Image: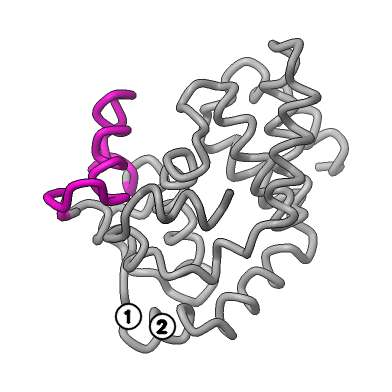
Amino acid sequence: MNKAIAVTKLFTVLCKNPSNPKAYWATLRLLAGKSREKSVKLFEESETGKRVLEQNLSLLSTMKNLDTSKEGSVAEYYDIFCKYWGIERQAIEKEFQFDGRKPRNTKEVLLQRQIAYHDLIHVILGYDATLKGEMQVVMFHFGQSRNWGFVLIALSIGWRYISSPYLMWKAYQRGKTTMRFETLDWETILNMNINEVKRMFA
């Protein structure tokens, strides 16, 4: 299928339902260019990436079995966020087709981590779980990765709100100037104080 036609079809689907996981990931794959390879290389060369690959760590498993007892921790606030917005942590793997399956390569390891920390971005950066909040998160991702699929997803949401151009630009700039999230030690961040972590990304 012609790429332009495929993009148009995906955009139409996303405009009707921006939360459609199949269209979401198909869009990111189609418009990724070399951004995925760059992200994988960045992850592999980072201290976090080396440790994750050597120890075969799974952030998805960590997120499903969180210790939320530490008052004021990122884990506690993430748990509150999920309960408030009705997000089922146990359903994340099934929704994105990683139900119990181990990643086969570094690209899949990173993808699973990105899926796992997606909602943590909402918590840490202060974006809610509405469509407007999701629009800002995907533009933050674009600022980090330069995957144009994120722009298409943001536009499929943005036409609903008059404030979208400003919010999209602000989130993009924030992602552009923030340390790359692929390289962060999310296992450690979960146990850190939420205010301390927010100051890191202020």
The percent position of residue 159, horizontal first and vertical second, equals 75, 15
The percent position of residue 149, horizontal first and vertical second, equals 73, 43
Residue located beneath label 2 in the image: 53
**In the image, is residue 170 above or below residue 197?**
above
Residue 100, label in figure: none
**In the image, is residue 15 above or below residue 30?**
above
* Count of numbered badges drawn on the protein: 2
**In the image, is residue 180 above or below residue 74?**
below
Looking at the image, which is closer to me, 97 or 165?
A: 165
The percent position of residue 194, horizontal first and vertical second, equals 36, 49
Name the residue rendered at 41%, 83% in the picture: 53
Name the residue rendered at 25%, 34% in the picture: 80
Residue 186: quadrant of the picture: bottom left
Which amino acid type corresponds to the residue marked 1 in the rendered image? Asn
Callouts 1 and 2 close, C-beta under 8 Å? yes
Magenta range is 67-93
Which amino acid type corresponds to the residue marked 2 in the rendered image? Leu
* Callout 2 secondary element: helix
Residue 61: quadrant of the picture: bottom left
- Is residue 170 left or right of 120 when viewed as pictured? right
Residue located beneath label 1 in the image: 56
